[in-house]
Image (cartoon, rainbow, N blue to C red):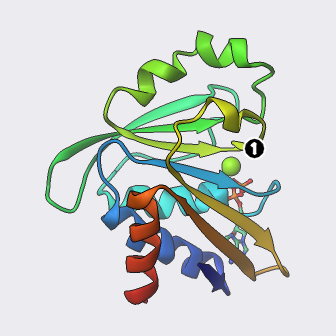
Amino acid sequence: MVVETVSPDTTFQFGQSLGRMLRAGDVVCLSGDLGAGKTLLTQGITTGLEVEEIVTSPTFSLMNIYQGKDATGAALNIYHFDFYRLESAAELIDIGFDEYLSANGLIIIEWPDRFRDYFPDEYLWIEIQAHSDERRQLTLLGYGTRYKKLCKELNQNR
Ligand code: ADP
Ligand code: MG
């Protein structure tokens, strides 16, 4: 599924729609260059999940945790990772990535590319490409039944 957004706002709104469809245990990978819109999309997702905290790139902290609510009103922990500065798989283990994966929250990962081998088999992968100052192409790839279905629903709902 490919989505074209024409402004920061439309990317944010797409994130909100996506966020409302996410739930505990989901993994969302956001790939794209610096300034592509990974954090803005995350802000849309977290707003869709009723997070009130300010969401920024956890570039130095590697991870931020937010509390939200899914569409059914169930409380949801959101683990927002940024692997830009992560140097090795050993570091991934050090920060407790595996524990977070099994913590039944929502995992969002910026700069996931180098660490794909350490992710679960099933996840939503979103590739963001800048086409001009304000245009972005979002390519959504669903790995596994759950995420394929999610892509289909997103496509139908727009
Ligand atoms: P990243 O986390 O990928 O480094 P950010 O989300 O922090 O990127 O920043 C994206 C920047 O691009 C913001 O300054 C935003 O205003 C700008 N921008 C312009 N057009 C868009 C768009 N269509 N979608 C997302 N961001 C956009
Ligand atoms: Mg970012």
Quadrant position of the N terminus in the picture = bottom right
Horizontal arrangement in the rendering, residue 36 relative to residue 102 (left or right): right
What's the residue at 47%, 64% (across, down)? 44
Horizontal arrangement in the rendering, residue 57 relative to residue 66 (left or right): right
| For residue 30, above or below residue 17 | above
What's the residue at 68%, 38% (across, down)? 116
Q: Give the tally of numbered discs.
A: 1
What's the residue at 44%, 61% (across, down)? 147
Quarter of the rendered structure image containing ligand 1: bottom right
| For residue 148, above or below residue 98 | below
What's the residue at 47%, 55% (across, down)? 144
Q: Nearer the viewer, residue 87 or 11?
A: 87
| For residue 99, above or below residue 1 | above
Q: Nearer the viewer, residue 21 or 69?
A: 21
Coordinates of residue 41 in the picture (x, y in percent): 56, 63
User: Pointer 1: residues within 10 angstroms few (<14), some, or many (20+)?
Assistant: some
Coordinates of residue 78 in the picture (x, y in percent): 39, 41
Horizontal arrangement in the rendering, residue 44 relative to residue 41 (left or right): left
The amino acid beneath tag 1 is Asp
- As drawn, the residue found furthest toward the left would be 73
Q: Nearer the viewer, residue 104 or 152?
A: 152
| For residue 39, above or below residue 85 | below
Coordinates of residue 121 in the picture (x, y in percent): 53, 41
Q: Choose top left, top right, bottom left or bottom right for residue 125.
A: bottom right
Q: Choose top left, top right, bottom left or bottom right for residue 72.
A: bottom left
Which element carries disc 1, helix, strand or loop? helix
Coordinates of residue 16 in the picture (x, y in percent): 41, 69
Q: Which residue is mark 1?
A: 113
Q: Nearer the viewer, residue 109 or 125?
A: 125
